[in-house]
Amino acid sequence: MKFLVINPNSTAAMTEALETSLRGYLDAAYKETDLRPELSFFTGPSDAPAQIDGSAASVVSTRTCLRALAETDTSGLAGVLVACFSDHPLVGELRARLPRTTLVVGILDAAVATCVARGVPYSVITSNDEWVALLDAAIARLAGPAIPLGLWRGTVASGVPVLDLHKDENWERVKKVISEENIQARSSQSIILGCAGFSGLEDKLHEAFPDVSFIDSVVCGLEMLVSQARLRRCEPGE
């Protein structure tokens, strides 16, 4: 099955980090080659924002990506993953435009579904402060009936811009915020890496905090797509 992973900003280095992380995951999880999903990657065009840092950037990102994707061959795709941890409008726009047989998932939706299923307290670590209210509102909508269970503990900003999350000089700051805010203040047992820029930092985080599960929203999104595509293939008439 073929899947397209979309980085809706124009930073190619972020797409490369996503690809490295996902291909490493596939090497570990799909040793049987006949079951391994086939991935291709898309980076937003040059006039897309270099990083998605709020609602306005998401709107520009959607407009520019839709134009570029109109010139991209999407035939035969089992699914599309929008790799931006937000309630990104590109998800809905693609669902409206692509054939019913092509599933579209955003990584925010997939990560929240994973945490609700696990049933332990969870929170989000994101990049800048602007995302806190936006993600809190989006997750309250997505988690819905699960909110009264008291598992959702809120969003924390690292204060590090998305493009700088991988820089070594920011590691201690990110680690300190997670320790003090996500773990100590919110008693989180699962922490969603609420930005595609965190992709690839999972091993360092697990080493630093071995008693906490770090949820890679990109991997969650891919697995949701793969499982739903397989289920759809088994439906009558498909």
Image (tube, rainbow, N blue to C red):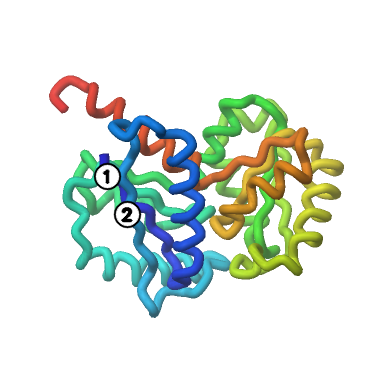
Q: Is residue 42 left or right of residue 201?
A: left
Which residue is located at x 32 percent, y 34 percent? Answer: 33
Q: Residue at x 47, y 71 (%)?
A: 11
Residue 190 visible within the image: yes
Task: Indicate the secondary structure of the residue bearing disc 2.
Answer: strand
Q: Is residue 223 left or right of residue 196?
A: left
Amino acid type shown at disc 2: Ser
- Indicate the position of residue 54 as horizontal and vertical percent values: 56, 66
Farthest residue to the bottom: give it: 47
Where is residue 216 drawn, in percent x and y? 57, 44
| Residue 190 on image: x %, y % | 69, 36
Residue contact between numbered discs 1 and 2, judged by CB atoms under 8 Å: yes
Please say if 111 is above or below 178.
above
Please identify the quarter of the rendering in which residue 230 is found. Answer: top left
Would you name the residue on which mark 1 appears?
A: 2
Separation of residues labelled 1 and 2 (CA atoms): 8 Å
Give residue 214's mark: none
Q: Which residue is mark 2?
A: 40
Locate the C terminus and report the quarter of the image it occupies.
Answer: top left
Q: Is residue 107 visible?
A: no
